Amino acid sequence: MTDIALIVDDSAVNRQLLARHLAGIEIEAREAGDGRVALQMLRELDGQVGVVLLDVVMPEMDGYETLAAIKADEELRHVPVIMISGVDELDSVVRCIRLGATDYLPKPFNPTILAARVRASLADKRVHDMELAHAAQQAALLETIERQKEELSRFLSPQVAALVSTPEGQALLAGHRREATALFADLRGFTTFSDQAEPEEVLNLLREYHGAMGALIIEHGGTLEHFAGDGMMVFFNDPVPQADHVERAVRMAVAMRDMFEGMAAKWARLGFELGLGIGIATGYATLGRIGFEGRYDYGMVGTAVIVASRLSSAAEANQILLNPRAHAAVDQMTQVEEVGDLQLNGVARPMPTVNVLAVTGTPAAVS
Amino acid sequence: MTDEAPVLDQSVIDELRDSVGGDEEFIADLVSTYVSEGSGHFAAMQEAADAGDAAAIVRPAHTLKSSSAALGAMRLSAIAREIEMAGREGTTDGLNERVTEARQAWDETLKEMAGAGLIK
């Protein structure tokens, strides 16, 4: 509650009279004989004072100084101050209002005017307190949302986590059609490795592999749809549009291959032959929320996804296979070798496919 | 001018009484506060007048003016107001005489208050 009125007047007669009038309208009053005592009481009553009735002429610390001190104090400045003033002191009232006083109360006191002004000031203070409380709630809510988003982004792609909290994002989640580039990657020799290696070794390898690949996905702005054991699917140009989505996918694939070489060498010394095969396909697809209530993924559905998956399966260790549409988009900046027309499962016609040997030139807009 | 103001304006007392719902005990209490506080103001005014300190007389005169007016002691309030004004202007001439005049008005006020049954 902030309904206490603090009466600051050096005249005990005035204090007693004001307190009595306030009691008549059921407002609790406290009294201070000068400004210094008033400031001390304001701080001790910590937020409970809803209005200050302040005399101008007082010993120790007069009304001006007291008012200035209240207005200069971050904790007290919002407490309304009503100046108590005689009819011949209107000049000082004007000065006090310029200093931040809310209103004034003429002497001799008229209980009706007193009640009206004190009630108005208490109401102001209550509104202000409510606003403060509301702002604090908002801040706490925002903090919770940020924390949840942060927590969520540990499980989802950052791009998808960001979607959840915007209206545009909600529209994208609902589903849309767009050209996109899908990338599948999985390990050659992983099945044999997981049969022969100790479970700890398998988990260590996956942890290292996911960590390294995850960093590259983030670096290239890819949206990770899923990790599944040794496999992963990443897509580009959605939900954040990327004009250079094919280039990003190809550069990321090359970086993954380079990165994996070092890791594979280490595992080879332990007797495990592992290689990374990557398939990339560009095409129109449907993107958005896929799944069921309780477990949704942000996914990509379309022929390009199937083609990328098949290319990844068809790829030998260290190969990065592109469909014709992806190849056309990066033709100028890549060195490729023909791997011929591949008959892919579920794809009607044999598909002319290339393997990326290297990417030349600097990235156009990879960030 | 100041002589024309009544020593005790009964209408102020009546209004005051009305405003507190006829609470005689409260009025008596308030008058008692006024009386005990008043002697302090006189002491402070006398000290300032003796020292010729115009600035120091402002505050007690101001407070006396205000509480006297609240209780209908209009003559004393008017004299206190003149003392306060003189103090603000830095006038020390005749300050002692003014304080003496105020003291006379104070005595008359107390007498009338007692007569009106406000001081038991």
Image: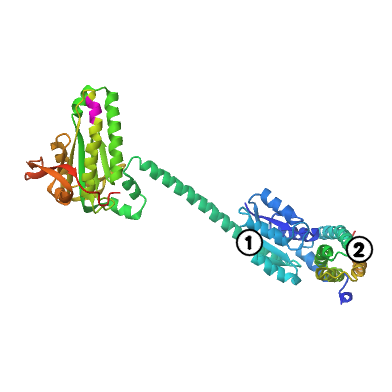
Q: Secondary structure at mark 2?
A: helix
Q: Which residues are magenta?
A: A264-268
Q: Main secondary structure of the magenta part?
A: helix
On screen, residue A139 versus residue A332, left or right, reads right
Chain label for disc 2: B
Q: Which residue is mark 2?
A: B50
Quarter assignment of residue A297: top left
Q: Is residue B89 left or right of residue A265?
A: right
At horizontal 25% and vertical 31% (from top left) the residue drawn is: A263
Horizontal and vertical percent position of residue B111: 92, 65
Q: Would you identify the image quadrant in which residue B67 lies?
A: bottom right
- Amino acid carrying label 2: it is Asp
Q: Is residue A103 left or right of residue B120?
A: left
> Can residue A303 be seen at all in this image of the molecule?
yes
Rendering colour mode:
rainbow
Give the distance between the C-alpha atoms of the residues marked 2 and 1, in whole angstroms.
44 Å
> Can residue A116 be seen here?
no
Q: Which mark is residue A121?
A: 1
Q: Is residue B99 magenta?
A: no
Residue A362 is situated, as x and y percent measured from the top left of the image, at: 24, 49
Q: Nearer the viewer, residue B27 or A346?
A: A346
Classed neighbour count for the residue bearing mark 1: other residues with Cα under 10 Å, few (<14), some (14–19), many (≥20): many
Q: Nearer the viewer, mark 2 or mark 1?
A: 2
Position of residue A7 measured from the top left corner of the image (x, y, whole percent): 72, 57
Instruction: Report helix, strand or loop for mark 1.
Output: helix
Determine the image quadrant of residue B95.
Answer: bottom right
Depth check: B110 or A259 in front?
A259
- Residue found at the far front of this picture: A361
Nearest the eye: A82 or A265: A265
A68 lies above or below A212: below
Name the residue rendered at 23%, 30% in the picture.
A264
Chain letter belonging to callout 1: A
